[in-house]
Image (cartoon, grey):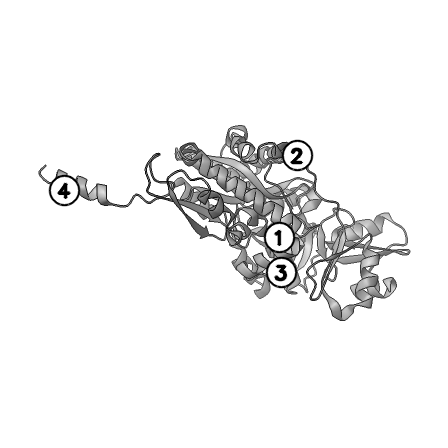
Amino acid sequence: MKHKPVVAALLLLAPLTACGSAQAGDSSTVTVTVGYQSKTINTVTAGTLLRSLGSFEKQLNSLHDGHTYKVDWQDYATGAPITAQMTAGKIDIGSMGDFPLLINAARGKQLGKPTRLVSVTGYNLRGGLNTIVTSPNSKLASLGDLKGKKVSTSVGSAADGTLVRALQRAGIDPDKGIEKLNQQPAVGASALSAGSTDALSQFVAWPGLLAYQGKAKALYDGAELDLPTFHGVTAREDFAKQRPTVLEAFLKAQAEATDYLNTHPVDAAESVAKATGLPAEVVYLYNGAHGIATFDPAIKPQLVSALKEDVSVLKAAKLTGDVNVDSFVDDQYVKKALGSDYAGRLALKPSASASEVWPKGASRTQSFKTPAELLAYVSAHKDGIRAAYVPDATTGTLWFADKAVWVADGDELLPFVAPETAQAYVSAHGGARVVTYAEALEQAS
């Protein structure tokens, strides 16, 4: 008992620094811990790009509430460890995909550490952020060909959800019809290259990266599902209630990063590439002016509806029980952070798909009305092209022009992400035929 005064004195002298720590009214340092996925590049407005711009730190410094703020950025490969750290009270704010968000909600409720979905980063209303790829020399040409094959994915991820739904539509039992390998994206990519798996179902940016590197080709475009997929920002409920102004500062900073990405897409792609080591051409495929992802922090009703549909997939896989999506979604903070701008952002629609060329040495891309016009430009400037992108004729998903499956239908040249959709078009249009990229270039020139 006689040691109590000494212990009390030592506690008073100890610095009060921890996740979202410091009591209201004191002047101690408050550390805000943000978990993000640097290479999951449609979360960059809440992670990689946001960090490089310093927008969150600037917003915190403008609070002038007597506290000194420090941001601890923690980078992870997937959403699962972010959820684990959040439920342990060690991460305040995190970003992850839709399926991991549901697991985040379920684990938080289960452990008495509830979390809330407070904003959206990047989304695709058709599901184009997830792609199934095979090795470049693979003879697999359709989803039906996956029956009995080994397929790598990250169980519980949005890409796993795409795989399950795609297989079900193809009449293949996702549990018994394939041999599913539960692997981290990088491990799955290595397995594909080594030939120890037949296909890989992954989320942004892995499919585009592997295709760009010549290590994979697309087998299935997730946009064929025509179901929205997105990434979002989740916050611990206790943190949000204790420090609402800090969370609002984060969401204001996220909006700034979003506006920067949308107005300076090439600069943003270069910045993210520098921070992650990913090729800027791959970053732009997803995050560019007409990229696969659309960035907007508003929580759109169609995304919430999609999240509700995702619950059944996770329940069937026994990864979660019921998830009350309505109680998980909490847009009060982003509405307050964005004020009168919120309604306008909520009404924004994705930009129309377009063909784009990124010339070497250019700080801007050039858009073309048709893929044929792009091909004509590429043919005339073969040594001056950094990257060329075309939208899938069926889904609108952007893809590298030289990696697309091309179909000639008379004078028209149509690109497709995957061979199965290209073949479906050919079957429905007499006289149409699949051509090589070189043949498409020659026809367009």
Which residue does the numbered mark 3 point to in the structure image? 280
> Comparing marks 4 and 1, which lies closer to the viewer?
4
Left or right of residue 342, residue 235 in this image: left
Give the secondary structure at mark 3: helix
Cβ atoms at labels 4 and 2 below 8 Å apart: no
Q: What residue type is labelled 3?
A: Ala
Cβ atoms at labels 1 and 2 below 8 Å apart: no
Q: Farthest bottom residue?
A: 383
Which residue does the numbered mark 1 point to in the structure image? 148
Give the secondary structure at mark 1: loop
Left or right of residue 10, residue 96 in this image: right
> Any mark on residue 6, and which?
4
Give the secondary structure at mark 2: helix
Task: Find residue 100 and report its horizontal and vertical position in percent.
Answer: 52, 42
Residue 409 occupies quadrant? bottom right
Give the secondary structure at mark 4: helix
Considering only order in the chain, which callout, 2 or 4, is on the residue closer to the N terminus? Answer: 4
Cβ atoms at labels 4 and 3 below 8 Å apart: no
Cβ atoms at labels 2 and 3 below 8 Å apart: no
Which residue does the numbered mark 2 point to in the structure image? 344
> Comparing marks 4 and 3, which lies closer to the viewer?
4
Tell me how far mark 4 sits from mark 2, CA to CA. 58 Å
> Is 344 above or below relative to 267?
above
Task: Find residue 150 and report its horizontal and vertical position in percent.
Answer: 59, 55
Left or right of residue 35, residue 207 in this image: right
Q: How crowded is mark 3: few (under 14 residues within 10 Å), some or many (20 or more)?
A: many
> Comparing marks 2 and 3, which lies closer to the viewer?
2
Considering only order in the chain, which callout, 3 or 4, is on the residue closer to the N terminus? Answer: 4
Left or right of residue 110, residue 219 in this image: right
Q: Farthest left residue?
A: 2
Residue 271 occupies quadrant? bottom right
